[in-house]
Image (spheres, helix red, strand yellow):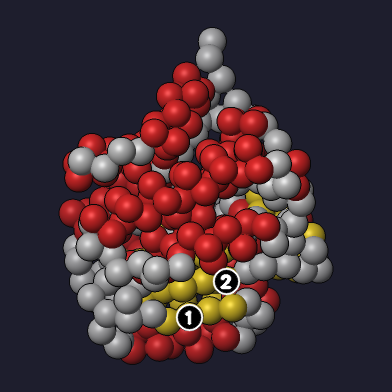
Amino acid sequence: MRIAVIGAGGVGGGFGAAIAKAGGDVSFVARGAHLAAMREHGLRVEGDRGETLIRPVQATDDPASIGPVDIVLFCVKLWDIESAGEQIKPLIGPGTGVIPLQNGIDAGDRLIPILGSDHVMAGTVAISATIAKPGVIRQTGTFMSMAFGERDGRASPRAEAFLALCRNAGFNVMLSDKIAVPIWQKFILLTAMSGGTAITRLPIGKLRDDPDVFSLFESVMRETVAVGRAEGVPLPADVVEKQTATIRGLPPGGVASMAVDLSRGNRLELPWLAGKVVELGRKHGIPTPANAAIFAALKPYANGAPA
């Protein structure tokens, strides 16, 4: 299979490198200093899972130079979905599947008007990784998993073929016929982790043993579950308990990508995380005070460090 990875950051770089190492025909779309370093030195992933170096690496800033592929792993930030969706049209052939792997819950809905419903799949990943310096991805912890599937739950040859490829790549992978459930399960975890680690500016190891602080995480998750069920997602009864256990088992240095962006003075995905919970709460008449407080506290930083 031919795979194109759009955005070679922690998610795209980490999973794309694993698939390339397993023999996949992977092309990366990147830009700036990161692209230049990849072309000169290759793409390096380092951290608790060991080291992977893809050299030479197929990397470009022009999707048209790649041509149609079988699967697109769409890994740009949430504010870039529409613009990047337009830019990847040269990658789309008759049977191409595009798997959005963003944080949040609405990336696929936003891509369909651009690429068409036949091409847009759905997916979610679990990994703690970020660009340490141009050409280098740093991963914290050993967890690394992907769930994906067709939005309507049907079996498809492209999904089965991609599943087989991922099984050789060394990370946990699941082809789901109810992909909205794992996407929302991650969203529940992420709203808590992104909000909690960002507003405190601390890693999870400094937070989870304090009952007053951790009650914020639990409140955020319960509000997110409530709006998810109101949206019709059949979330398990014990989803908060399981995600709480996940947070308690994360590496102590773990922080959400939004907290990393905040520390670097970058734009935040806040409107699509805590902001999305608040929006859906208003839609369904469900109170979301914990998410609203996080949204209000971080809103001045949403477009980067205040001038």
**Residue 134 higher or lower than 177, as above or below:** above
Q: Position of residue 264 (x, y in %)?
A: 65, 30
Q: Residues within 10 Å of mark 1 (few under 14, many from 20)?
A: some
Specify the label residue 174 is tagged with: 1
For this view, does 21 lie left or right of residue 182?
Answer: right
Residue drawn 39% across the image and 33% down it: 289
Specify the label residue 145 is tagged with: 2
Residue drawn 49% across the image and 24% down it: 297
**Residue 63 higher or lower than 193, as above or below:** below
Give, as a three-letter code, the residue at label 1: Met
- Residue 285 falls in which quadrant of the image? top left
Q: Position of residue 98 (x, y in %)?
A: 35, 67
**Residue 221 higher or lower than 166, as above or below:** above
Q: Position of residue 262 (x, y in %)?
A: 59, 31
For this view, does 306 lie left or right of residue 127?
Answer: left
Label 1 to label 2: alpha-carbon separation: 8 Å
Give, as a three-letter code, the residue at label 2: Ser
For this view, does 71 lie left or right of residue 251?
Answer: left
Q: Residues within 10 Å of mark 2 (few under 14, many from 20)?
A: some
For the residue pair 182 and 113, the one nearer the viewer reads as: 182
Numbered-mark total: 2
The answer to whether any part of residue 227 appears in the image is yes
Residue drawn 52% across the image and 48% down it: 218
The secondary structure type at the circle numbered 2 is strand
The answer to whether any part of residue 32 appears in the image is no
**Residue 84 higher or lower than 233, as above or below:** above
Q: Are marks 1 and 2 in contact (CB under 8 Å)?
A: yes
For the residue pair 43 and 205, the one nearer the viewer reads as: 205
